[in-house]
Image (cartoon, coloured by chain):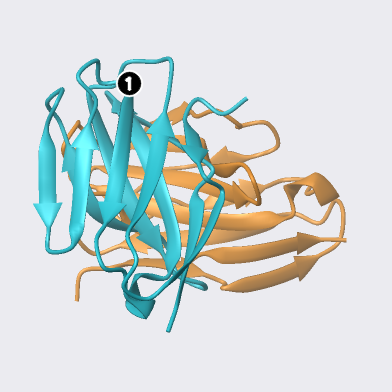
Chain colours: A orange, B cyan
Amino acid sequence: EAQVTQNPRYLITVTGKKLTVTCSQNMNHEYMSWYRQDPGLGLRQIYYSMNVEVTDKGDVPEGYKVSRKEKRNFPLILESPSPNQTSLYFCASTGSGTTNEKLFFGSGTQLSVL
Amino acid sequence: TQLLEQSPQFLSIQEGENLTVYCNSSSVFSSLQWYRQEPGEGPVLLVTVVTGGEVKKLKRLTFQFGDARKDSSLHITAAQPGDTGLYLCAGVNDYKLSFGAGTTVTVRA
């Protein structure tokens, strides 16, 4: 089954403790992206990657890192999480990221930073 | 400030009624997408509109892209409880999607 898999689904952590949210897709997609969703703000793009070893900042990249060493994986790293990074995070992928491509989303990771 | 403004923010209607959700921007997009999101899940693409003035119909859902490619609307005819969800519009330019804040639609049986 074609899918985007995120782990974990729920994560509670404390300020400053490094964490990684994993994202994997099995569709051989070139384009992958991370979003955060906050009430009243919709989805905002954090980082995206157009291919292996190619990443770029989205609208809200501060406090986040990503890597794209393999085509299927695109982990999101929070080196020193802070409470304002408490949010619902989504990973998404698509074939090439151009205009008409369908974006496939994972089921989300609810992160709480205390 | 949202690049895309959706209205209304919340909409609660009775089964069988019609509804319209609006998505407006001052920016021009190469295309616009509509997604539906259910609690605990990621958004799922409903449609992509590409041409200014384009109208697409999917069963009871009608999507329209404005002539100037800055705005769009989603109209649901004879809404059903299964239409309940968060509807998101997203403007597309190159590799960038900009999402609206969403419209929460509740259809009461």
Tell me, yes or no, if residue A82 can be seen here.
no
* Residue A107 image point, x, y percent: 45, 68
Q: Chain of mark 1?
A: B
Residue at the spot of label 1: B70
* Residue A109 image point, x, y percent: 57, 65
Judge from the rendering whether residue B8 lies leftward or rightward of residue A79; answer left or right.
Answer: left
The kind of residue on which mark 1 rests is Lys
**Viewer-proximal residue, B81 or A40?**
B81
Image quarter where the N terminus of chain B lies is top right
Residue at the location (34% across, 31% down)? Answer: B91
Residue at the location (48% across, 38% down)? Answer: B6
* Residue A19 image point, x, y percent: 69, 58
Q: Secondary structure at mark 1?
A: loop
> How many numbered discs, if any?
1
Image position of B61 with respect to B66: above or below = below
* Residue B56 image point, x, y percent: 11, 45
